Amino acid sequence: MSVELLPILRPTRVPWNKGRIIGQKRPLMPKHVWSIRVRLEMAGNARDLALFNLAVDSKLRGCDLVGLKVRDVFAAGRVKELTSMIQSKTGKPVRFEITETTRVSLERWIGDPEMIGRELLWPSRIHGSPHLSTR
């Protein structure tokens, strides 16, 4: 069969990343962090505000952050100033400071009626899962 008689094959779909910038994203600037905090405060979303603040303070991976327990950050009726945990990926302990802003938001979240008797700091809203998913 000669080459002239073969059908021309053309892709029928456009690639999902055509025209998009791929790769690592730039880190958030301080003004972006504060604008997110203000929006969460104005919305009255205690859970998401506490989660965002703790993520910024701890710099933990998402899988480690959602697996935190109340006793890791809360003791003797108040939020700890300094806490540590073992990373799941590396197995090494990590110590981090919890700032005043984060402590206030965590106290508000832990005092919420939804958190009474909970062991995990970020319980799932889906009953089949023990804690918040990274997805």
Image: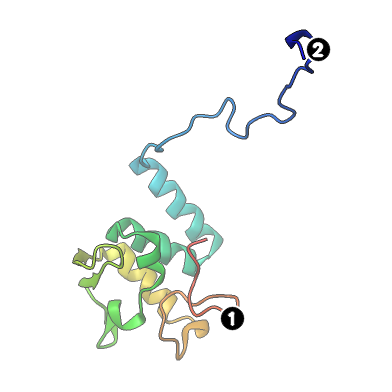
Up-down: is 103 above or below 28?
below
Task: Tell us which disc is closer to us: 1 or 2.
Answer: 2
Kind of residue indicated by mark 2: Leu
Query: How far, Cα to Cα, is label 1 from label 2?
Result: 58 Å
Q: How is the image coloured?
A: rainbow
Q: Nearer the viewer, residue 75 or 126?
A: 126
In the drawing, what numbered circle is on residue 5?
Answer: 2
Q: In terms of image quadrants, where is residue 61?
A: bottom left
Report the quarter where the N terminus lies: top right
Q: What is the secondary structure assignment of the residue under circle 2?
A: helix
Q: In the image, is 15 to the left or to the right of 109?
A: right
Q: Residue furthest top?
A: 4
Relative image position of residue 9 (x, y in whole percent)? 73, 21
Relative image position of residue 3 (x, y in whole percent)? 73, 11
For disc 2, the neighbor class at 10 Å (few under 14, some 14 to 19, many from 20) is few
Name the residue located 21 percent from the left edge and 64 percent from the top edge: 96
Q: Nearer the viewer, residue 3 or 71?
A: 3
In the drawing, what numbered circle is on residue 128?
Answer: 1
Name the residue located 48 percent from the left edge and 60 percent from the top edge: 41
Q: Nearer the viewer, residue 116 or 96?
A: 96
Kind of residue indicated by mark 1: Gly
Name the residue located 21 percent from the left edge and 71 percent from the top edge: 84
Q: What is the secondary structure assignment of the residue under circle 1?
A: loop
Relative image position of residue 22 (x, y in whole percent)? 47, 33
